[in-house]
Amino acid sequence: MEKIQSVRGTYDLYGEAKRKLKKVIKTGSDVVEKYGFEEIETPIFEFTEVFSRNLGDTSDIVTKEMYCFNDKGGESLTLRPEGTAGAVRAFISNGMQQNLPVKFYYSGPMFRYERPQKGRQRQFTQFGIELLGVETPQADIEVISMAYEFLEKLGLAGAVTVEINSLGDTESRNNYREKLVAYLKKHYEELSEDSKKRLERNPLRILDSKEECDKAVVENAPLYADSLNEVSKKFFADVLKGLDNLGIKYRINNRLVRGLDYYSHTVFELTTDKLGAQGTVLAGGRYDGLVAQMGGGDVAGIGWACGVERLAMLLEESVDLPRPIAVIPVGDDANDKAMEIAYKLRLAGFRVEQSYSGNMKKRLAKADKVNAVKAVIIGYDEIAKGEVTLKDFESGEQKTVVFDNLIKELS
Ligand code: ATP
Ligand code: MG
C-alpha cells in the first residue's frame, strides 16, 4: 500500500505550529472578552442554504469553494466556509433578537475548495467576532479597535496596515453599481471570462478580482467615494473620526469591496506584505442586510474574521511551554514514592515530567531533553528519612529537602 497521506490542502497541527495557533486564539479571546463578547460554537456543517442564500451570490466562496454533500437522508449539507452565516443562523434559530446587542466570538475550522498554496489551505482556522443590533458608527469603531488591539497584543501591530472603505447604504451601492457597469461595459472585451459573467450578477466583485487583465481595467474604474450619498458619507466620516480619536492609523482603499455580497457601509482588512500574495490576515465589514436576508428581521450587524494560520506564521518568537520539573526515582523501590510526589506537585500546579524507565544517567538525559528546570531525585534511603534531593539544572547545585518543604522550595 502506498504511504497514507492527508488530503491536499489539509495539515496535521502539532508542536510549535499548534502552540502558535493556540496563542493566537487565546490572545484573541482575552481581548474580545474585555469588550463583552462571549464565545459561541455552532456546528461545522449546516444546511447548504445557510451559506448560499440567493442565486445572485457570485462570491468565490459560494460559487466555487464550498464542500457540499448529500447526507444519507438526502439533505444537502455544507462544511462551513466561514463563520458569519452560521452565527447569524444561530442568532435567528435561538430567537436572540429580543435582547440586543448580541456579541459573539468564535474559532474553529473552516473549509474551502481552493488551490492550496502558502497561506491558502482547504481546511484552515478562523477566529472571528460578530456584533448584532448596533446601527451606529460606534460599533464599527469598536470592532476595528478591537481587531487592532488583538494584533497589537500579538506584537504584530507594526507589521499590518488597516485598510478601510465604505460601500455606503443601498442607495449609494445602486448608484455606484450603475456607474461601474456603464464603465465596465465599455471594457467588456478586456475582462476575464469570470468577470464577464460577474458583470450581470455582481459587478462589484470585479473590483476584487485577482486576474491581471481585470486589475488593469479596474485601475481606472469610477471611485466608490464619488457615489456615496450624504448619509453614507457622514457615516464613513464618523467612523474615520472615531479611529483618529483612538490613534488608530488606517489607509483608505477605494478598491476594497470584500468577496461576499452582503456588506454595506464599512469594510476593512488588515494586511501585511510579509506573506506574499496571501497578505490579508483579518477582514470584516458591516452586513446590515444579512439578518433580514436570512429571515431574522431588520437587525444590523458587523463583524470580522482572521486567518489564524496566517497570523501564526507572522509570530517570530517561538511559543514555549513552562519548563517542567523532572521526578526521578533511584531504583524500582522508589517508584511508588516518585509517583506520589509527582501527583502532589501536579495538584499544586507544577508541570511535572516522569521518566518511566532507565538508569539514573538515562533519566537525567531524558530530563534534559524535556528541558526540565529542576529534578526531584528520590532514593530509597532518603524516603525513610522523609527527604529528597533537589537538583537545579541551571546552576548544577544539589541539596537535600524534606518532603514537606518541597512545594515551598519549588515555588
Ligand atoms: P482571500 O482574498 O485571501 O481569498 P477571503 O476574502 O476569501 O481571503 P475571508 O472570507 O474574508 O477571506 O476570510 C477571513 C480571513 O480568513 C482571510 O483574511 C484570511 O486571513 C483567512 N483565510 C481565508 N481563506 C483562507 C484559506 N483558504 N486558507 C487560510 N486562510 C484563509
Ligand atoms: Mg478567498
Image (cartoon, rainbow, N blue to C red):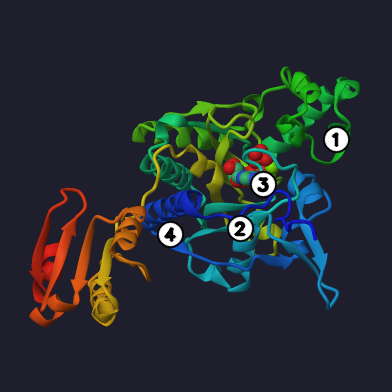
Q: CA distance from mark 2 to mark 1?
A: 28 Å
Residue located beneath label 2 in the image: 109
Q: Is mark 3 within 8 Å of ligand 1?
A: yes
The image shows residue 392 at horizontal and vertical percentages of 18, 55
Residue located beneath label 1 in the image: 194
Q: How many marks?
A: 4
Q: Which SS class for mark 4? A: loop
Residue located beneath label 4 in the image: 37
Q: Which is nearer the N-term, disc 3 or disc 2?
A: 2
In the rendered structure, the answer to whether residue 307 lies left or right of residue 146 reads: right
Instruction: Please rate how many residues cluster around mark 4, counting C-alpha atoms within 10 Å: few if below 14, some from 14 to 19, many from 20.
Output: some
Closest to the camera, between mark 3 and mark 2, is 3
Closest to the camera, between mark 3 and mark 4, is 3
Residue located beneath label 3 in the image: 121
Q: In this view of the protein, can residue 411 be seen by the observer?
A: no
Amino acid bearing label 2: Pro
Closest to the camera, between mark 2 and mark 4, is 2
Q: Which is nearer the N-term, disc 2 or disc 4?
A: 4
Q: Nearer the viewer, residue 204 or 336?
A: 336
Q: CA distance from mark 1 to mark 4?
A: 39 Å
Q: Which SS class for mark 2? A: strand
In the rendered structure, the answer to whether residue 117 lies left or right of residue 155 reads: right
